[in-house]
Image (cartoon, rainbow, N blue to C red):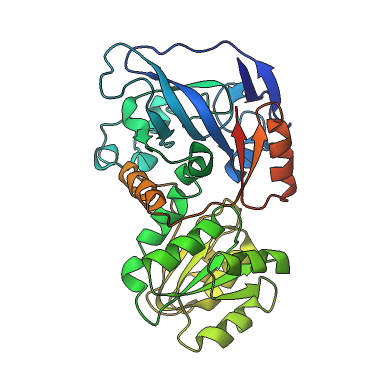
Amino acid sequence: MKAIQMVKAQAEPELREVDKPSPGPGQVLLKVTAAGACHSDDFVLNAPPGALGFDLPMTLGHEGAGVVAEVGSGVDSVTEGTSVVVYGPWGCGVCRFCSQGLENYCSKAEELKIYPPGLGAPGAMAEYMIVDDPRHLVPIGDLDPVSTVSLTDAGLTPYHAIKASLPKLVGGSTAVVIGSGGLGHVAIQMLRHLSPAQVIALDVTQNKLDFAKSVGAHEAVLSDSDAVDNVRKIVGKDGVTAVFDFVGYQPTIDIAMGVVGTLGDVTIVGLGDGSATAKVGYWAQPHEVSVRSPYWGARTELLEVIDLAHNGVVDVALETFSLDDGVEAYRRLAANNLRGRAVVVP
């Protein structure tokens, strides 16, 4: 079968012929119907040799959708022909966090060398993929897998980030979304649906700001040296209630810490190399500001995100590619010239 694989570090992926896998005991074989490309893939592809701990070559794709094609012995909770998406942050299933559905924070994953598909384990950028356990499958019914697959990360990650701040996002509150790309444009839609907060989007070009407003942002501000002043002109002296930074580099973190108000939240989601450390302290920011750096989301939250999709709440902007053209999707991703998400359709 065909698969897009990371063959060596700091090189673009390759379309290769590999053996079709067979499910072992407790496993499920999916015929892939859609696979999403993500900036996390770009981060992995550009990591130094040996830095990530897993063997190469590796099939990419941590956003996966498919139809159950075959089940291994002992699997009776899913049936062939079921349309599903894959919950990506696999864990041991039994530690304190996994028992709460928080496999994204599994305390034994590193020790047991458990990797997410496409981020260490073979992923969805192929004609078929193995899912380690049926608990990592979420049926999607009649939802289109192509328009749904990105919700496994681009939907789940912002949902998990936003959910913790919802008690603060009441009438009269303000939320800032920094970066209106693949995850940020979904976050804007979720904030508009889940809260009455005023939503302000920040990005680096007018085209991206126009895009942010088209998906629901009330206001849009250039992310430049004047961003803090311009946001504060909108929100006033009380500052912003919750900031969601989907970039994570030092300039955006500095903006987040510069606009947040008393009792506010700063949530750093992006994989940039910035840090809020120098900005946190009694004299450094308004009182009782909380700074978090979450990772992905819980299994139960993916169920909730899929329910939102059934209700028509989120509309993921995407561009589609065939498996034969999938390497081009990664080139476009690296060049940062995609509008929304890239989805590969085998």
| Observer able to see residue 10 | no
Q: State the quadrant of the C terminus.
A: top right
- In the image shown, does 297 or 20 lie closer to the viewer? 20
Q: Quadrant of residue 44?
A: top right
Q: Quadrant of residue 163?
A: bottom left
Q: Residue furthest front?
A: 142
| Observer able to see residue 253 | yes
How many badges with numbers are in the image? 0
Q: Quadrant of residue 90?
A: top left
Q: State the quadrant of the N terminus.
A: top right
- In the image shown, does 185 or 316 lie closer to the viewer? 316
Vertical placement of 345 versus 147: above or below? above
Q: Is residue 330 left or right of residue 298?
A: right
- In the image shown, does 144 or 254 lie closer to the viewer? 144
Residue 171: % across, % down: 36, 80
Vertical placement of 199 versus 345: above or below? below
Residue 121: % across, % down: 50, 25
Residue visible at 34% across and 13% down in the picture: 72
Residue visible at 39% across and 82% down in the picture: 172
Residue visible at 37% across and 37% down in the picture: 141
Q: Is residue 17 left or right of residue 100?
A: right
Residue 85: % across, % down: 43, 35
Residue visible at 34% across and 37% down in the picture: 107
- In the image shown, does 215 or 311 lie closer to the viewer? 311
Vertical placement of 328 versus 287: above or below? above
Residue 204: % across, % down: 70, 66
Q: Is residue 107 left or right of residue 17?
A: left
